[in-house]
Amino acid sequence: MPARTATRLTMAMADCCSVLAEPITDRHAVELAQAFAALADPVRLRLFSMIASAGTACSCNLIEPIGKSQPTVSHHTKVLADAGLITGEKVGRWVNWTVVLGKLDQLRAALAP
Amino acid sequence: MPARTATRLTMAMADCCSVLAEPITDRHAVELAQAFAALADPVRLRLFSMIASAGTACSCNLIEPIGKSQPTVSHHTKVLADAGLITGEKVGRWVNWTVVLGKLDQLRAALAP
DNA sequence: TCGTTAGATTGATAGATGTCAATACTTAGC
DNA sequence: GCTAAGTATTGACATCTATCAATCTAACGA
């Protein structure tokens, strides 16, 4: 579902590696900031961590432990997905969320010395 | 100047490593989110990148290339410093900013598989 | 087909945030 | 002490965001 956005960010971000090496471009800064913004919320970080450690998870299993309303969880999964950090596969009535490891690699690379 | 804040966050964050391994605690999520929030702005990312690649930089050398007002730059350096990502040493009339590599290590570790 | 369930969308609201002008603070040099 | 220069702080404003109630959509089961 967030395939286009994730792909676009992925390709655009591939033109650089570490933020520490040289001053990043304005475009790169905007893209990286969007990715970090997705991780800049405690609820999203917990959702992300729950999905990652579970390997896969549907939204219905996240609502109760996260302690937020269903629309709020849906909003946060959308933000994470738009940032390319998770991807959702709809199977039947529910959505299986999984983390996108490649995106994490990019973020780690951006912070690498 | 931001020594207390940085140290507190550093110690509290040391009680965990990767977000992917197991569901993170609420406290850990709040701390990590604060750190990522500091990187979730294009202007701050560019400031951070400029300081890092220069090794050290004073605010006076950041204002013109970043294209923002002096109070805005001061605000952003404060946010980065409060997050423990940079540290400032006042020498004479100006402040020398440098990146805190240990903080970056923590963030990379949090995103490590 | 109908009721149920999982998820998304919309609308509204309170709070956070980025920005700048104006001002205050601090230090160096005279 | 006075003035100038580098930073920090305050106040104001516009924008963004997290949240929930209500509603809508889609898919399964009886």
Image (cartoon, coloured by chain):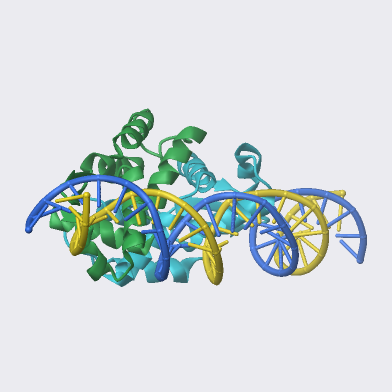
Chain colours: A cyan, B green, C blue, D yellow
Answer whether residue A18 is visible to the viewer in this image. Answer: no
Residue A50 visible in rendering: yes
Left/right of residue A58 with respect to residue B89 in the rendered view = right
Task: Identify the residue at horizontal 50%, vertical 48% (top origin).
Answer: A41
Which one is nearer the viewer's eye here, D18 or A71? D18
The quadrant the N terminus of chain B occupies is: top left
How many marks the image carries: the answer is 0
Left or right: residue B102 compared with residue A73: left
Front-lying residue, A11 or D12 = D12
- Residue B41 lies, in percent from the top left, at 39, 60
In this view of the protein, which residue sits in the foreground, A72 or B98?
Answer: B98
Q: Position of residue C3 (x, y in %)?
A: 89, 53
Split into 4 quadrants, where in the image is the C terminus of chain B? top left
Above or below residue D15? Residue B88 is above
Relative image position of residue D20 (x, y in whole percent): 72, 49
Judge left or right: residue D20 versus residue A24. right
Frontmost residue, D14 versus A45? D14
Residue C13 sits in which quadrant? bottom right
Q: Position of residue D9 (x, y in %)?
A: 40, 49
Instruction: Give the residue at x 26% y 65%.
Output: B63
Residue at 19%, 44% in the rendered image: B89
- Residue B59: quarter of image: bottom left
**What residue is drawn where x is 21% and y is 43%?**
B101
